Image: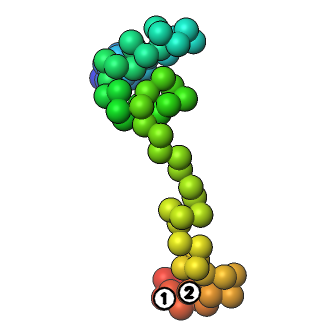
Amino acid sequence: MVFVLTFTISKQKVNQKIHIIPTNAEERRLVLQEFIDQDKTPTWLGGDDTFTFDPNSYYSWNDLANDNESLEYLASMAHL
């Protein structure tokens, strides 16, 4: 009984957070404006934000460990 009540309440809360974005550009822009500022909305969704994510500049690929370093790290862990 408690599970059913909790599940129902949490389902309602989740459903309130889900919004279907229209495919029509003008309708989509109006819906998005309710939740996201125009300057934070990407241009491909009709906004003004021109930011393009570049994973190579975001992640420092030089800091990644190679396979041998990863295995050495795992071997050094006392609980394994």
In percent of the image, x 43 and y 27: which residue is there?
A: 47
**Callout 2: helix, strand or loop?**
helix
**Callout 1: helix, strand or loop?**
loop
Rendered image quadrant of residue 34: top left
Does residue 14 appear anywhere in the picture?
yes
Residue 60 to residue 75: above or below: above
Find disc 1 in the rendering and name its residue.
Answer: 78
Please indicate whether residue 35 sits to the left or right of residue 72 in the image. Answer: left
Question: Dot 2, how many residues are within 10 Å of its Cα: few (below 14), some (14-19), or many (20+)?
Answer: few
> Which scheme is used to colour this image of the protein?
rainbow
Residue 50 location in percent, x, y? Answer: 47, 40
Residue 77 location in percent, x, y? Answer: 50, 86
Please indicate whether residue 34 sits to the left or right of residue 72 in the image. Answer: left
Residue 3 location in percent, x, y? Answer: 35, 25
Q: Which amino acid, mark 2?
A: Tyr
- The image quadrant where one finds the C terminus is bottom right
Residue 50 to residue 53: above or below: above
Does residue 3 appear anywhere in the picture?
no
Residue 59 location in percent, x, y? Answer: 53, 66
In percent of the image, x 47 and y 45: which residue is there?
A: 51
Question: Dot 1, how many residues are within 10 Å of its Cα: few (below 14), some (14-19), or many (20+)?
Answer: few
In percent of the image, x 68 and y 88: which residue is there?
A: 68
Q: Nearer the viewer, residue 49 or 53?
A: 49
> Which callout, 2 or 1, points at the residue further toward the start of the chain?
2
Q: Which amino acid, mark 1?
A: Ala
Which disc, if any, is residue 73? 2
Residue 56 to residue 47: above or below: below
